């Protein structure tokens, strides 16, 4: 039921770990399944994401989507990173089973939460970035209507 890419990223997740003195850290959970994701961003003075790491206590789909999300944001500007949605991450993985779509939201929200933390520390505003939720469960009802 999982694509080869999902299995690959689940079995060999990229960018797992922590960044000391990260520019921004975002933690997001899903109260329904209890899974948690933490994302660390290292952003340089030109607002380019130099490095990214993640840690998760989550299901296989959460691991695979976070791994792919870190690959997609690495080396990008923060504005480019803002455009990376959970759908883009899923497409890069050749899709997820419908019941696992909500898991991909953890990665997207964790990136937004880390960018929010960075913006607060820098005293700047990032265009289009809203205060992230710490629990994405509220979004799920909307997701299911798709
Ligand atoms: Fe919780 Fe996948 S079941 S993130």
Image (cartoon, rainbow, N blue to C red):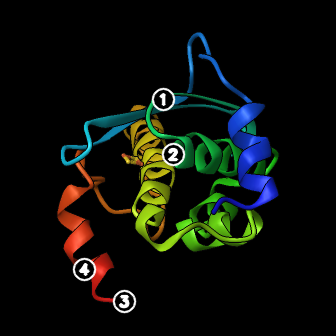
The quadrant in which the C terminus is found is: bottom left
Q: Are marks 2 and 3 in contact (CB under 8 Å)?
A: no
Q: Earlier in the sequence, mark 2 or mark 1?
A: 1
Q: Is mark 2 within 8 Å of ligand 1?
A: yes
Q: Which residue is mark 1?
A: 56
Q: Which residue is mark 3?
A: 146
Q: Which residue is mark 4?
A: 142
Q: Are marks 1 and 4 in contact (CB under 8 Å)?
A: no
Query: Which residue occupies 58% across, 73% down?
Result: 87
The mark found on residue 62 in the picture is 2
Q: Residues within 10 Å of mark 1 (few under 14, many from 20)?
A: many
- In 3D space, how far apart are the residues under numbered discs 1 and 4 (Cα atoms)? 24 Å
Q: Are marks 2 and 1 in contact (CB under 8 Å)?
A: yes
Q: Residues within 10 Å of mark 2 (few under 14, many from 20)?
A: many
Q: Earlier in the sequence, mark 1 or mark 4?
A: 1
Residue situated furthest bottom in the rendering: 146
């Amino acid at each position: 039921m999982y694509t080869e890419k999902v299995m690959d990223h689940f079995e060999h997740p990229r960018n797992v770990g922590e960044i000391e003195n990260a520019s921004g850290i975002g933690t997001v959970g899903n109260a329904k399944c209890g899974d948690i994701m933490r994302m660390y961003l290292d952003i340089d003075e030109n607002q380019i994401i130099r490095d990214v790491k993640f840690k998760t206590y989550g299901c296989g789909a959460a691991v695979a989507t976070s791994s792919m999300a870190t690959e997609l944001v690495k080396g990008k500007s923060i504005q480019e990173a803002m455009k990376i949605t959970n759908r883009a991450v899923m497409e890069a993985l050749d899709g997820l089973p419908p019941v696992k779509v909500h898991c991909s939201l953890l990665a997207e929200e964790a990136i937004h939460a880390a960018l929010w933390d960075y913006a607060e520390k820098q005293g700047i505003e990032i265009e289009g970035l809203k205060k992230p939720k710490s629990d994405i469960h509220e979004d799920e009802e909307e997701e299911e209507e798709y």
